[in-house]
Amino acid sequence: MAMDVIDYDIFGDDMQYVEIELDPGEAAVGEAGMMMFMQDGVEMETVFGDGSESKSGLLGKLMGAGKRLLTGESLFTTIYANQADIKRRVAFAAPYPGKIVPIDLSQIGGTLICQKDSFLCAAKGVSLGIALQQRLGAGFFGGEGFILQKLEGDGMVFFHAGGTLAEKTLAPGEVLRVDTGCVAALQPSVDFDIQYVGKIKTALFGGEGLFFAKLTGPGKVWLQTLPFSRLANRIIAAAPAAGGRAQGEGSVLGGFGGLLDGDNN
């Protein structure tokens, strides 16, 4: 299926959103719940799967929806089509602090592997599939499980990485060891494996877990400094209502100050 060629602008710093400009007749596909606004003339249509199987019949649509279900996403995506006679815009917002990363699939071989919940939006026609981990170790201890998301096509895609983004290009045979949760995306040419940290004392008391992600080139990898799971754990740990321990806000009254300011609910 031919991809729509879309123009875009990314706004913001730590909490970003992307505006996509659609020519008459062009369309974009967005993850459920990510749309920020759309101008008059843009029409929404909720479809099974990713919309790339629109001409393949019921079986193709069911297969597309099933792939999304396996990655933990909704069975549905939303297509935003410009039905006006002039250019119109639709915007998608990042769900938590981080960076929106634009990738032209035609410039990286047509395929991108990314973490399951990072997809934001894309040009209509991009296929959203699954990438199964081939090794048991990578599946059990890789931080993202056996199933990652695979984006295929030759159009623009946008994914979200938590915190600050680091893009690395690995030479053939070059190895990079990364915290398992910090792998945001990679090219399929990069070999993804899991490596034990090596020393019992380091594993138990180093605070970095028992395993590293071992990435072997060639290819590009995109790393994130703040995996959502790490952010969520910190919030829960500081939330008394969720069973965590209050961290305080620097008051000289300590815990007694919390009784006075009403923040103990």
Image (cartoon, rainbow, N blue to C red):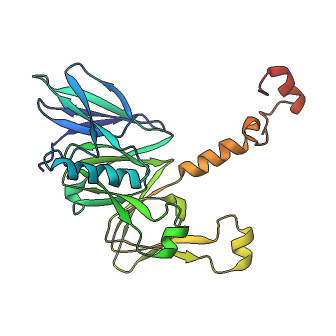
Question: Percent position (x, y) of residue 188?
Answer: 32, 68
Q: In this view, does 187 lie to the left or right of 225?
A: left
Name the one closer to the observer, 146 or 260: 146
Could you tell me which residue is drawn at 27 percent across and 44 percent down?
122
Could you tell me which residue is drawn at 29 percent across and 46 percent down?
49
Residue 254 seen by the camera: no
Question: Percent position (x, y) of residue 54?
Answer: 17, 44
Name the one closer to the observer, 63 or 204: 63
Question: Percent position (x, y) of residue 129?
Answer: 31, 56
Relative to 188, does residue 118 appear above or below in the rendering? above
Q: In this view, does 89 lie to the left or right of 25?
A: right
Question: Percent position (x, y) of residue 259?
Answer: 86, 24
Q: In this view, does 191 lie to the left or right of 8?
A: right
Q: In which quarter of the image is the C terminus?
A: top right
Name the one closer to the observer, 178 or 171: 178
Residue 30 seen by the camera: yes
Count of marks placed on residues: 0
Could you tell me which residue is drawn at 22 percent across and 25 percent down?
42
Relative to 31, does residue 258 appear above or below in the rendering? above
Relative to 183, does residue 217 appear above or below in the rendering? below
Q: Which quadrant of the structure image shows residue 262?
A: top right
Q: Which quadrant of the structure image shows residue 35?
A: top left
Residue extending farthest front: 58
Residue extending farthest top: 40
Could you tell me which residue is drawn at 85 percent across and 21 percent down?
260
